Image (cartoon, grey):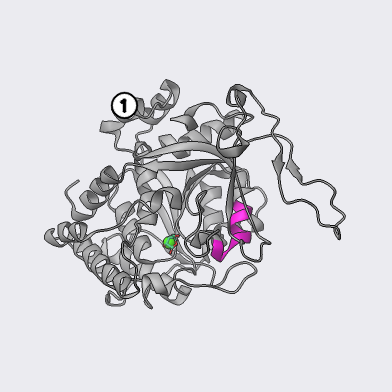
Amino acid sequence: MESQQKPLGMTRRQFVASSASALATGGLTAALSRDAQAAGVPPSEQSDRQGHHAPFRVIIDTDPGVDDALALLLAMRSPEVKIEAITAVAGNVPLELTLPNALRMVEIAGRTDIPVAAGAKAPLVRRLVTAAYAHGENGLGGAVFPESKIRPIAEPAAQFIQQLVRRYPSDVTLITIGPLTNVATALNSDPELAAMVKSVVMMGGSLSGGNITPAAEFNVYVDPEAARIVFQSGIPITMVGLDVTRKTSLTEDHVRLLEAAQNPVSQAAAKIARNAINHNREQGFLVGPNMHDSLAVAGFLDPSLLKWKQYYVDVETVGELTAGETLGYSPNAGDLRRAGMEKQVGVTMPIRGSAPTLGSTRTSPILRDKFVPNSNVATDVDSARFFDLLIGRLSGKQ
Ligand code: BDR
Ligand code: CA
């Protein structure tokens, strides 16, 4: 697994933390040793992970959302994580719907111990663009559930994220499966916070084209300025983008397995999934929906489901057609590749932006002189094993 070579130019903290986010975060401890070896995880990191018996503290930031809903149910059925909070954000549908949808999932899973906080109603500097075309007007593919009896906590999401990260410094992983507005707001309000976040595991971005424009993946497209703040924060990032999530199309067979299991989580997941498939077909999509967000959660639980590669990822924020595009710089990938560079420490590889315009005072397109990765990017997925985990956990068979 390429990402597990010590990344060039990374500090020990960055490396350990990024390894933890990409490799060590999660349980499935029984399978760990075998999986870790198969995945090429160095022995030091294997023992780090094996030694971690307590559940990993996470906050899930989400915009439910069909795939968010199933991702939340998956996480709430997974003993490897201690979910400190679920924070809702506007995205797939407005906050007025994502928040109640998050509360519904918590209630269905019988996990009313988890605090749910209301987050941003709109991106940092843009008007909200939603994805009702993919998730239906209610965000759950049209699947209707009663209103939940539980209420959100009083603290706004960004403030609650800040409180939790400060309460457990270097111990909280943020799993973000919606636009990054809440996280960026928390980071903006507290300059010391980034250094205290263990890692961000993000469903977002793509190094191989977008799903809402040819350039941009939806979560980054909706709030590119927020995404840029997160990518540039110095927090080790695990990026589970469209490169892998577009290989996770939900099928009728999956729905039938969920329907066959007689428990509330499986029944709810089946109902959402069936409605979402029908909605997708009505909208003219031939496959899907893809389980983007569940894959991010699953990759956290079991990193050996995915293959990883180190990149410096940045976000386009000014393009008229390309805002929200994520760019992955690497000295050993694509046309920027230079033979032998992957073995050098602190590679002198210019991170190059657009050429200066005649009207600007900027003279150089070089944004950074050295290649220092900020993200572990998922580059391939074992879809069959992913669905075994997802359906197994949701149906109560695992
Ligand atoms: C992402 O966008 C949303 O529509 C999904 O919930 C997922 O988080 C995929 O691009
Ligand atoms: Ca989402």
Look at 34% across and 40% down and name the residue there: 305
Q: Which residue is mark 1?
A: 33
Q: Position of residue 323 (x, y in %)?
A: 62, 62
Instruction: Judge by depth and name the residue closer to the eye, 45 or 85.
Output: 45
Other-residue count near label 1 (Cα within 10 Å), few / some / many at <14 / 14–19 / ≥20: some
Q: Position of residue 73 (x, y in %)?
A: 30, 58
Type of amino acid at the residue the image marks with label 1:
Ser
Indicate which quadrant contains ligand 2. Answer: bottom left
Q: Is 130 within the magenta? A: no
Q: Secondary structure at mark 1?
A: helix
Q: Position of residue 219 (x, y in %)?
A: 50, 61
Q: Where 75 falls versus 169 (above or below)?
A: below
Q: Is 222 within the magenta? A: yes
In the picture, which quadrant includes the N terminus?
Answer: top left
In the picture, which quadrant includes the C terminus?
Answer: top left
Q: Is residue 170 visible?
A: no
Secondary structure that dominates the magenta span: helix
**Region rendered in magenta:** 221-230
Q: Is residue 223 left or right of residue 269?
A: right
Q: Is residue 272 left or right of residue 174?
A: left
